[in-house]
Image (spheres, rainbow, N blue to C red):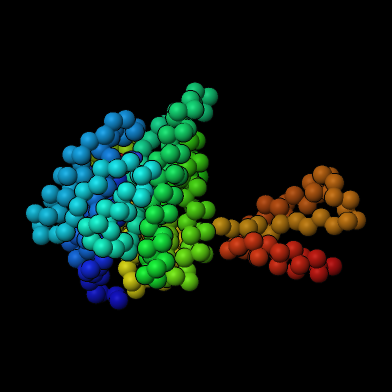
Amino acid sequence: MAGEQLRYDGQTVVVTGAGGGLGKAYAVFFASRGANVVVNDLGGSFNGVGGSSSMADQVVKEITQAGGKAVANYDDVVNGESIIKTAIDNFGRIDILINNAGILRDISFKNMKDQDWDLIMKVHVIGAYKCARAAWPHMRKQKYGRVINTSSAAGLFGNFGQCNYSAAKLSQVGFTETLAKEGRKYNILCNVIAPIAGSRLTATVMPPEVLEVLKPDYVVPLVAVLVHPSNDESGAIFEVGGGHVAKMRWERAKGALLRADDSFTPGALLKKWDNVSDFSEPSHPEGPANFMELLEDAQKLP
Ligand code: NAD
């Protein structure tokens, strides 16, 4: 595929939160490469207040004026069924789902209110679930589907003032890894990205010169590759921004094994603590089976 222009003719892409930022960049790109696009956006504020049809309408207008095919949908992502129905009603199918819609409710944990926590869970966790759940039967039936979920560095590493968002965003990793396992035999491939880009979510925390090198357009190539029919990657986590793309994975330290003759005491564990955090010879587990193998191997050691 290298060097060829990737195209998506005849395919239908649903992009949630496509009224601005990253979602708009995806929507405009896929329309320019032949796809039918559902431009979903609730049109509220960055912290999840209000709603309006104008953001989605504007993007649809830009796409159609450029000769592309797009329809607007103004539903909240928790109404995933209605968003996917827009794809089926207008284009007869759904091939690619990009769960991208998002908001922030940053506040220190000490001051967090239930509504700050609940709203973030609603949009990021329930919203992604609802859209994927509604798309899934169509993808299974046609034995084809591509799903992108959106995590964040805040989810992978934590970030001061974002414990609600961090929890919601790391959920997308586990969600994606399981969807990838369940979808594989139906050729439904699912990956999760942790993007970084200048948008209204980051405009207040990044200076203009930094935002300039982090254009949403620079995230598009990775998403484009992952949702193309030629892709075989699934269940992977990618960090992407400013043109840099890298896979992320879990790493396990050497580890310590307590045995019956150690009495399984905390003191016995403390004696071996250096091994618990020794990353000099790491392994990279890919599932629970790896752990049981490791346990069996370790039991054989003298
Ligand atoms: P953005 O605010 O420009 O775009 C998000 C869009 O989602 C908005 O247009 C908003 O109206 C829409 N939206 C919000 N709640 C919605 C809902 N309930 N239903 C439908 N639409 C809704 O922000 P962005 O930076 O482009 O963010 C896109 C995604 O990337 C988000 O999931 C965000 O958490 C994630 N992300 C962004 C960055 C970054 O650096 N920009 C970093 C990590 C993760």
Q: Quadrant of the C terminus?
A: bottom right
Q: Residue at x 26, y 63 (%)?
A: 92
Q: Residue furthest front?
A: 89
Percent position of residue 293, x then y:
70, 67
Between 165 and 39, the residue placed more toward the observer is: 39
Q: Quadrant of ligand 1?
A: top left
Can residue 24 be seen from the camera position used here?
Answer: no
Percent position of residue 69, x then y:
16, 59
Is 9 above or below relative to 112? below
Is 162 above or below relative to 242? above
The quarter of the picture where residue 226 lies is bottom left
Is 123 above or below relative to 223? above
The quarter of the picture where residue 77 lies is top left
Percent position of residue 267, x then y:
84, 44
Q: Is residue 263 left or right of residue 3?
A: right
Percent position of residue 230, x then y:
34, 73
Q: Residue at x 31, y 61 (%)?
A: 94
Between 119 and 222, the residue placed more toward the observer is: 119
Q: Residue furthest top?
A: 111
Q: Residue at x 37, y 70 (%)?
A: 142
Q: Is residue 253 left or right of residue 296?
A: left
Q: Residue at x 85, y 50 (%)?
A: 264
The quarter of the picture where residue 301 lies is bottom right
Between 130 and 48, the residue placed more toward the observer is: 130
Q: Quadrant of the N terminus?
A: bottom left
Is 260 above or below relative to 11? above
Can residue 290 be seen from the camera position used here?
Answer: yes
Q: How many marks?
A: 0
